[in-house]
Image (tube, helix red, strand yellow):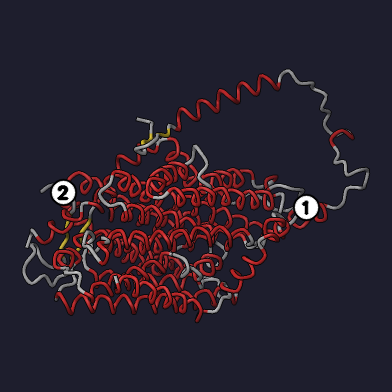
């Protein structure tokens, strides 16, 4: 075995271990030098990114890879924790590490005047570790453990600006919602374990009988993970948390939110993959029922997201509501893919949804960073108190325009590519849904045109005469996201063929995920 | 290679960008036929408000909360209801969670 092969075979564990150990080393490195701490965080995340890249190249070509903790081979009974990495989980890991890297670069300047940065970076790396763990694990209890770590570390990060009372209130709301949700996840896992004496996802998927208890588990996991992903009407924690956390933190919490969304997909497509075609009452297949439930919740999310964003004057809260609408678009695509399982347009919807997952992270992430840059320069959150910033913040204005066009699904940016796939495939299921989604996209454009006018255009305000451009590291972070939005927009096939289609296929091909473990015992 | 296929249509961003570029060149050409009477820094470039004095920048700017006033005003009933739902009360957040849980239990459990 060559060094590279060894590295690939050990990478699932290393991808978790590197950010985890770095998190606890940060306070020590911080004592030596603050600059060294910043470099250390980026280098460690870069190394994790390289490992993810190596693993991705192997998984996309050779199929799912398993890593067993504490044993060389699978054995009966399967009591060990194992990680199972397929194209979908590695796709999510790529998004997580990318967002984390950008957040750290942005934090160099954005957080430079803050105290307690050793704790900040420790918590940040812990959220990254937990999100990566949720995405790579093949064990449902292990998924719960990482979900809990993510909740606690995210809560502490949301409350980082503790001097602002509202940050503390947002963190309190987040931990209440997360703790209640996590308890229900634990309850669902308990039901599964009691029935099947297994916690491994592939084993559970193989053994699932779709009993009445399994129906309860399905509802529990769908609702809790949907709530954690920001699905309406359980979305209310999201604008509070996104609006009060430092914008660099929001980027990291977004990766944890997307990991919950991944959890929904893993539950529906993999754990319940074998029983999705089960006929229920009135000969209605389960996948149609679950698909339409997700579609209804998605449409509610899109409508509430855009309607509420319309009246916001706090820029961060406004973007928070836009994020809810974007999550709605992802669920609309996923719901369509599930309802129309086995059809060609169902597969296209899934590809559109997976691509939109990446685009959501890039576009909403970019808008949050721009909002952070405005806050950094003006120390103001309200759109009513700012204006004319395009005169001094030229690069930030350009990045905002890219972000607004991308999030509104305007060609030729990335948002259009994924929304094009979503509209076309959803139209085949039900044209009205597609029309509602399209109209909400137009409203989204109107919302961000309002922000463009209010924040960047108009006369120069005397109070903001001394405003200057954001520091270089913040511009670099925004530039990377904006560049990727343009690149994906101009060459969508490049990404679709290399990472999106394999990820979507991995979800559809749940038999391969199951047989990698079950066939190996 | 550059064309994104949806099964019922296609999207080619490179072709789109090329067409937009050609359109811009065409528009630039039309612009060339116009008069170059614009003189920077003269009365010509000042804001004309029906002969009234231009106010201070703070007074002249339309605030974000006033933008789309007509839209939000015509949908006042909807917004009043939605504002009531988004009251910031954590108990209500959990209530919505329990409500959705109950509805889905009934739908999936009964079916």
- The image quadrant where one finds the C terminus of chain A is bottom left
Residue tagged 2: A5
Label 1: how many Cα within 10 Å (few below 14, some 14–19, many 20+): many
Please state if A374 lies on the left or on the right of A508 as rendered: right
Residue at 28%, 56% in the rendered image: A89
Res A39 → quadrant = bottom left
Total residue callouts: 2
Q: Which mark is residue A490?
A: none
Observer-side mark, 2 or 1, equals 1
Residue at 56%, 48% in the rendered image: A442
Depth check: give the residue in front, A517 or B40: A517
Chain that bears disc 1: B
Is residue A48 visible in the rendered image? The answer is: no
Residue tagged 1: B61
Please state if B109 lies on the left or on the right of A33 as rendered: left
Chain that bears disc 2: A
Secondary structure of the residue carrying tag 2 is helix
Residue at 49%, 40% in the rendered image: A413
Q: CA distance from mark 2 to mark 1?
A: 62 Å
């Amino acid at each position: 075995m060559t060094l590279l092969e060894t590295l690939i075979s050990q990478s699932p564990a290393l991808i978790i271990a590197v950010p985890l150990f770095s998190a606890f080393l940060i306070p020590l490195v911080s004592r030596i030098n603050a600059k060294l701490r910043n470099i250390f965080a980026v280098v460690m995340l870069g190394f994790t990114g390289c490992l993810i890249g190596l693993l991705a190249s192997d998984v996309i070509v050779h199929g799912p890879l398993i890593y067993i903790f504490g044993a060389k081979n699978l054995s009966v009974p399967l009591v060990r924790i194992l990680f199972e990495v397929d194209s979908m989980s590695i796709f999510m890991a790529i998004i997580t590490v990318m967002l984390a890297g950008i957040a750290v670069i942005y934090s160099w300047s954005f957080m430079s005047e803050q105290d307690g940065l050793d704790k900040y970076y420790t918590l940040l790396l812990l959220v990254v570790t937990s999100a990566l763990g949720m995405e790579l694990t093949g064990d449902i209890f292990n998924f719960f453990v990482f979900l809990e770590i993510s909740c606690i570390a995210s809560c502490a990060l949301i409350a980082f600006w503790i001097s602002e009372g509202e940050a503390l209130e947002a963190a309190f709301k987040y931990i209440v919602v997360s703790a209640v949700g996590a308890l229900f996840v634990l309850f669902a896992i308990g039901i599964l374990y009691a029935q099947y004496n297994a916690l491994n996802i592939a084993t559970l998927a193989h053994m699932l009988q779709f009993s009445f208890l399994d129906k309860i588990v399905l509802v529990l996991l769908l609702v809790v993970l949907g709530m954690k992903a920001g699905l309406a009407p359980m979305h209310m924690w999201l604008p509070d948390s996104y609006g009060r956390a430092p914008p660099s933190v929001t980027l990291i919490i977004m990766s944890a939110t997307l990991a919950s969304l991944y959890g929904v997909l893993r539950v529906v497509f993999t754990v319940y993959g074998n029983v999705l075609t089960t006929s229920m009452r009135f000969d209605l297949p389960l996948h149609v029922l679950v698909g339409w439930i997700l579609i209804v919740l998605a449409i509610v999310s899109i409508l509430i997201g855009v309607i509420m964003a319309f009246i916001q004057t706090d820029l961060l809260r406004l973007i928070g509501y836009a994020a809810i609408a974007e999550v709605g678009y992802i669920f609309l695509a996923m719901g369509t893919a599930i309802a129309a399982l086995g059809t060609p347009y169902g597969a296209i919807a899934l590809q559109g949804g997976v691509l939109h997952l990446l685009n959501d992270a890039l576009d909403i992430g970019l808008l949050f960073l721009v909002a952070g840059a405005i806050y950094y320069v003006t120390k103001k959150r309200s759109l009513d108190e700012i204006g004319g910033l395009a005169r001094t913040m030229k690069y930030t204005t350009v990045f905002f325009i890219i972000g607004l066009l991308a999030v509104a699904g305007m060609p030729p940016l990335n948002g259009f590519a994924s929304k094009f796939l979503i509209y076309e495939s959803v139209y085949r299921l039900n044209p009205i849904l597609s029309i509602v989604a399209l109209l909400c996209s137009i409203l989204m454009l109107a919302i961000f045109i309002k922000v463009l006018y209010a924040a960047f255009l108009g006369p120069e305000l005397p109070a903001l005469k001394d405003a200057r451009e954001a520091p270089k590291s913040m511009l670099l972070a925004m530039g990377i996201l904006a560049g990727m939005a343009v690149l994906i927009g101009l060459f969508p096939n490049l990404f679709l063929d290399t990472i999106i289609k394999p990820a979507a296929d991995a979800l559809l091909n749940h038999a391969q995920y199951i047989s990698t473990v079950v066939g190996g015992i | 290679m550059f064309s994104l296929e949806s099964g019922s249509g296609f999207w080619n961003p490179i072709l789109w960008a090329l067409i937009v570029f050609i359109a811009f060149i065409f528009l630039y050409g039309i612009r060339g036929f116009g008069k170059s009477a614009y003189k920077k820094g003269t009365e010509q470039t000042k804001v004309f408000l029906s002969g009234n004095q231009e106010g201070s920048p703070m007074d002249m700017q339309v605030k974000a909360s006033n933008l789309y006033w007509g839209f939000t005003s015509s949908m006042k009933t909807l917004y009043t209801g939605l504002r009531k739902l988004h009251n910031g009360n954590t108990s209500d957040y959990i209530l919505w969670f329990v409500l959705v849980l109950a509805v889905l239990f009934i739908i999936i459990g009964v079916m």
